[in-house]
Image (cartoon, grey):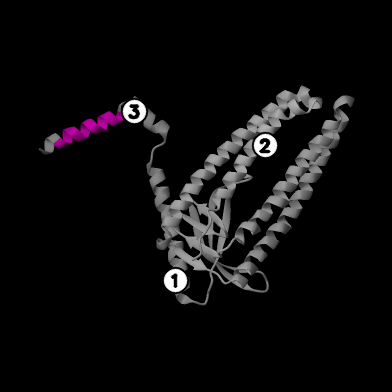
Amino acid sequence: MLEIKNPEKQNIVLSLIAAVLGVVIIFIPVIIKAVEIYQFYFTYAGVVMIIFAVGYAIYFYRRYRQFEAFMEKKDEALIWEYDEAQYVGFIGELNKIQKNSEKKKIWILLGIELAISILLFIMLSEGVKWLGFVFFAFFATLSVLFTIILPQSFKYKALVKPYVTIIQDDSAYIMGRFHRWSKAQAKLKNYDNGEKMYKVLAINYEALTRNGKLFQEWTAVIPNPDDSNMIADAKSWVSRINKFTRLHEKKMSERKSWSEQLFDKMVGKNKNKKLDKATESKNQK
């Protein structure tokens, strides 16, 4: 297998670039005297941007380390390598569906933002009516960025070579991305685009996205669905992933929350348990 680059490295770099842009925003009023009276707003926006950027950089660095540990155990994982024509064709179908969905969103968002901008232009005094145009330009740019440009990163990352899937009980490398979960639902299913049938191993889990924490399904196409041994391996790993989730949920349900632990400590419940165990031990002797 060819060497796989850590997919979280790029996210760390982008987060640090965003932090630098936050610093630049803070100093804009110092450079451009025309906006000097808005120093507070620029400083506020810059500081918020820096805080979020640094937070994301720390988060992605943690995932960077997790991916390195994941790759060290790849010999224990399920590994599928793909023929280029099969893999690229499957990614193309997924990308087509995503693009059609995003087009609807962008028109709705732009319509709402235009309406708000017009209201601002009507309601604001003559000296600051231009803020209505600034509002529309700023949020329209963000909308296009998050609904059209950034989603294209799906195809870009998915087509990073080598074309390979690696799956473990609590994590996976699918479509050029590192996935990690504590709770997931895995299954085998068919993906039919009307022309060709793909058999896939689908994993649905909650992850941090640009819209917050959401459940997403990621599909690893099975290289040779006619191979009975490959299908048997896929079913085995589906069971392992679902079993890992059941065990994790059982463990979490048995673990008391910090407030319950604090209450037990305040009322001396833990001490009473230890005393009962000590008394029982003495009686047995």
Q: Position of residue 229 (x, y in %)?
A: 44, 74
Please state if 173 lies on the left or on the right of 116 as rendered: left
- The C terminus appears in which quarter of the rendering? top left
Residue position for label 2: 21
Q: Position of residue 18 (x, y in %)?
A: 64, 39
Whether residue 36 is situated above or below residue 274 in the rendered picture: above
Name which quarter of the figure residue 210 lies in: top right
Q: Main secondary structure of the magenta part?
A: helix
Q: Amino acid at mark 1?
A: Ala
- Front tag of 2 and 1: 2
Please state if 225 lies on the left or on the right of 134 as rendered: left
Q: Secondary structure at mark 1?
A: helix
- Front tag of 3 and 2: 2
Q: CA distance from mark 2 to mark 1?
A: 50 Å
Q: Amino acid at mark 3?
A: Lys
Q: CA distance from mark 3 to mark 2?
A: 48 Å
Name which quarter of the figure residue 162 lies in: bottom right
Residues 151 and 186: in front is: 151
Q: Magenta segment, which residues?
A: 269-281
| 273 within the magenta span | yes
Density class for disc 3 (Cα within 10 Å; few <14, some 14-19, many ≥20) is few
